[in-house]
Image (spheres, helix red, strand yellow):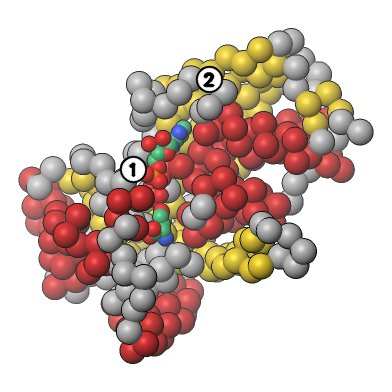
Amino acid sequence: MTQTLPVGISVTARVPASSANLGAGFDCLGLALGLYDEITVTTTGSGLDVRVEGEGAQEVPWGPSHLVVRALERGLEAAGVWADGLDVVCRNVIPHSRGLGSSASAAVGGLAAANGLVRKVAPERVLDDAQLVQLASEFEGHPDNASASVLGGAVVSWSEADAGCEQRRYRAVSLRVHRDIKAVALVPSVRSSTAHTRGLLPTLVPHRDAAFNVSRAALAVVALTERPDLLMSATEDLLHQAQRAPALPLTTKWVSALRSAGIPAMVSGAGPTVLALTTEPFPDELRAAAQADDLSVLALEVADGVQVD
Ligand SMILES: Nc1ncnc2c1ncn2[C@@H]1O[C@H](COP(=O)(O)OP(=O)(O)OP(=O)(O)O)[C@@H](O)[C@H]1O
Ligand SMILES: N[C@@H](CCO)C(=O)O
């Protein structure tokens, strides 16, 4: 039976950004990054009121088609809970269409906020992390981003055919990232479309290139958790970065420049952000040169998963 939420209860979800692929782990590795969107939801007597501050405020719809709202409603539905009205305030920091998983964060934030409301009235109906990974991945299509924002740390994600069901089952496990590893994101001011850069990928790849990436992705699990000294080898890739390079010239230039300087760097998700994972301080001269190239240089912690208060 559906349970109706009382009017006047409120929750805030704080959801991290994420970086997908991490070099070799195309469509399966991800990392939660300490750049956060905040979503506050309050139940009301009727209707839907949406306000957006910060990133994308002038672009995203302020109504029922807003990604956060759709995820919020999906989360309530999945838990069997109904709200007569909702007031939704989004304070956005994660840049959109830069390879930092903003759309996954929006989906995870909406679902987590729904879960926070459910917890207040029907704790037995709260969705667990596996359900959040599933629902967020269905929304977003990128479980590598979505599961990082749900679980935090680094993640390995995969999908399985669900017997008797058309929907795939998305699964993920979280890795405890070595404490010395720090992330630095070089974020261009220009955007890139994930759909466009996915379209640059070939349908088939040589077997030897697939084998190369399998070895590096497996190594990445070791490098991220125990052996940061192996990050350079572990982030080598033959499957997606060179193929996307024509659409990402500034990104490609900086991945190459950082790697030449001995810093494990890679395209973050589908780009255009460059992600560096390093145990050393980021060199001042490279920071200044990147800023001169119109890149924002952000030192980011490896984040925990979405939090709800
Ligand atoms: N906080 C948000 N609220 C509403 N819509 C959002 C939000 N964040 C992203 N979106 C939608 O998702 C689009 C960006 O999705 P896209 O997949 O291109 O990039 P991304 O998620 O930022 O990066 P990535 O390459 O890591 O997936 C935005 O243009 C917007 O329509
Ligand atoms: N693994 C996906 C991430 C998109 O955010 C890709 O590289 O297209």
Query: On screen, 137 above or below 86?
Result: below
If the image is split into quadrants, where does the N terminus sit? Answer: top right
Query: On screen, 25 above or below 48?
Result: below
Quadrant of res 122: top right
Residue 191 visible, this orientation: yes
Could you tell me which residue is drawn at 68 percent across and 58 percent down? 166
Looking at this rendering, what residue extends furthest in the right direction? 1
Could you tell me which residue is drawn at 52 percent across and 33 percent down? 67
Q: Which residue is mark 2?
A: 63
Q: Position of residue 272 (x, y in %)?
A: 26, 51
Q: Position of residue 261 (x, y in %)?
A: 14, 71
Split into quadrants, the picture shows ligand 1 in the one at top left
Task: Name which residue type carries label 2.
Answer: Gly
If the image is split into quadrants, where does the C terminus sit? Answer: top right
Mark 1 vs 2, N-terminal side: 2
Task: Name which residue type carries label 1.
Answer: Ser
Residue nearest the observer in this picture, 59 or 260: 59
Q: Which residue is mark 1?
A: 97
Query: On screen, 270 above or below 53?
Result: below
Quadrant of res 42: top right
